[in-house]
Each structure stands twice: as structure tokens, then as C-alpha cells.
Image (spheres, grey):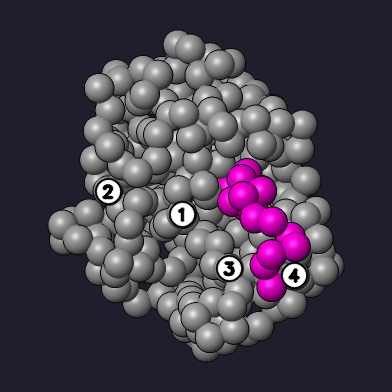
Amino acid sequence: MMQDFGVTLEDIKSARAVIRGHADATPLIPSPFLSQHAGGEFLLKLENMQPIGAFKIRGAMTAIAQLDPSKVKGVACCSTGNHGRGVAYAARERGIKAIICMSSLVPKVKVDGIKALGAEVRIIGTSQDDAWQEAERLCREEGYIDVSPFDDRFVIAGQGTIGLELLAARPDLATILVPVSGGGLAGGIALAAKSLNPDIKVIGISMDRGAAMHASIHAGEPVDVEEVASLADSLGGGIGLDNAYSFALCRDLLDDVLLVTEEEIYKAMQALYYEDRIIAEGACVVGIAAMMSGKLKTIETPAAAIITGRNLDMDMFTRIVNGEDVTLGTTRINGSPYGQ
């Protein structure tokens, strides 16, 4: 019997009903190239095909559906981009004002995408924690309702619907690779998948620069980390020292959490583009990077990876697929043409 995490399989099934017809049923496709690497069938869950270009719409719609537009002033959140886009979309659908707080590290393309959905964007400080403090102030002092990017039971339930869809399509899945940041996606998928099949392996992967959940699991409690520029910018930020849900889910349900380098993410972005013709954010390919680099030493198949979003800086992406050098803050990544 699954332990009590404050979020249940029934919550995830309820979320499935909320998002039905709006944010569900994204494609699950085979990748012949990655199947060769895995030594068995390898599938890609294309959350980059969502209306907002990312999986975050699932959790945002689930959480905001609980609110009565006539009784709330608005919603506020902090975001590295895709959660803000999801909140902006869901709030617009419900006729609710949204303020999205973001740090200066967030790429301009993500800021512009949120503004295009009608939300107000506030750029605060140089880290996700700075943005979180402003979102918290809006809720505490001005009466806005917080929609956490990851530590909210409705958000986690919404993201967990991906797990339901994966096992509905492929009950024989043996492994799921999930990008992990604050843990809402990884925790929700792990809860859904392991509730249905306790033997399935769910592995979280992050970048090796500021991976808060990885550091927190190793410390045995939520800890702060320094946030730095990364190709996997969507995975930046802390998990909150008073984390109520996602830390325990990831700590207890993930079978492992692996870290990959910027160079490995770079090569995985190239591979996904050239081999599977998919444009994806750096955060999406961390599982592929772990497999291609050998850090995921063995993988039980059939396996699936979540391609979480496509909202990336296309100038940066073009340089990567062309094998050019890229600069992230003070770090330079030496590029090379694909296959070299």
C-alpha cells in the first residue's frame, strides 16, 4: 500500500478529468536511435506538443480549476518560464488575473511567451529564490493566491496525469526517465506509476549545476543551492526549505537521481534534433544525456522519457545544432558538429 504523501492516486485521476480535452493525450512515439542506445524499445512522451509548448499546463489547469473567479483577486507564482506560461494560460481561461515573478536568468523568449498570454511579468533579482520572495509577498500582502511551480498537491496531481497516460498506453513500461527540478513532475509521475505498478523504475535526472532536489535528497532535507545559468534553465531554482510535498515524493519514490554536464546536455539536444527531428529545451534531454553519456549504466526496457517542453531561445538552439560554441553566464561550452 502506498504511503501517505498528501497526494493520492485518486487526486491524479481527478486531475485527469479536469484537463481532459485541453492538456492530455500527448503523443508517445518510438525512437529507433535511442532504442539502439538502450538495447530495447525506447519511447518519447511529447509534452512539447502541449498548447503552451510544455507539460506545466497540466498542473496549472488543475490548480486554478479549484478557484472561483468571482472570489479571488488573482494568482501569483514564481517561474523559470514554463510554469508561468501554464499559469498564464489557465488563468486566462478562467478569467483570473495572473502575475508571474521571474529572475533575470530566464530567457527572453519565455518572458515574451507569458506576456502574450495576458499575464503581468515581474523580473525580480538574479535567482528563482528572489522571484519566489516577490510572489510570496504578493500573496501575503496583496491577497493573491499562490500557485506553486511544484509544491502544491493539485499541481503535482496534474503533472502525475502523465504517469497515468504512459501506463494506459504501455502497461509493460519498465523504466521512466524524468527531468527533476522542484519535483512536482517527477514526484507526480512516480506516484502515479508506482501506484499502478510498484516494480516500475522512475529515475530523475538534472544538470550538475545547482540541482536542488539532488542535493536535498543527499542531505536528507531541503537545502538551498546556488542557481547558475544552464542549458537546462527550466530545472533551476530551489525546492523551498519548508517543502510540504515534492521532496518526500522524490526522496521515497525515485529509484535514483543522476546529474549530467552542460556538454552532455548540448550533445543530447543535437542528437534529439538530428535523429528524431525534435526541437526541445535543454531540460527535456537530461535523461537522454544520461543514457548517451553512460551515466545511466543499465536501463530496463521498454523505457520512456518525458520531452517536457519546446520554449527555448532559438538563436541558442541554432548555434547548438550547428555545433557552435555557446556561452552561459561566465561558462563557455565548446561546441562540435553532431557526431564528432
Question: From this viewpoint, is residue 77 visible?
Answer: yes
Please indicate whether residue 189 sits to the left or right of residue 224 in the image: right
Q: What residue would you read off at disc 1? A: 152
Relative to 136, say whether 85 is above or below: above
Q: CA distance from mark 4 to mark 1?
A: 19 Å
Q: Decide whether residue 62 is among the magenta residues.
A: yes
Which residue is found at the position 80% from the left and 53% from the top? 93
Mark earlier in primary sequence (1, 3): 3
Instruction: Report the mark closest to the observer, 2 or 1.
Output: 1
What is the span of residues highlighted in magenta in the rendered image? Answer: 58-73
Under mark 1, the amino acid is Asp
Question: From this viewpoint, is residue 267 visible?
Answer: no
Mark earlier in primary sequence (3, 2): 3
Which residue is found at the position 65% from the left and 24% from the top? 29
Q: What residue would you read off at disc 3? A: 145
> What is the quadrant of residue 189 in the picture?
top left
Residue placed most toward the observer, 262 or 213: 213
Mark earlier in primary sequence (4, 3): 4
Q: CA distance from mark 4 to mark 3?
A: 10 Å
Under mark 2, the amino acid is Ala
Q: CA distance from mark 2 to mark 1?
A: 13 Å
Q: Residue 136: percent from the left, percent from the top?
A: 49, 78
Q: Which mark is residue 248?
A: 2
Q: CA distance from mark 1 to mark 3?
A: 12 Å
Under mark 3, the amino acid is Ile
Please indicate whether residue 232 sits to the left or right of residue 224 in the image: right
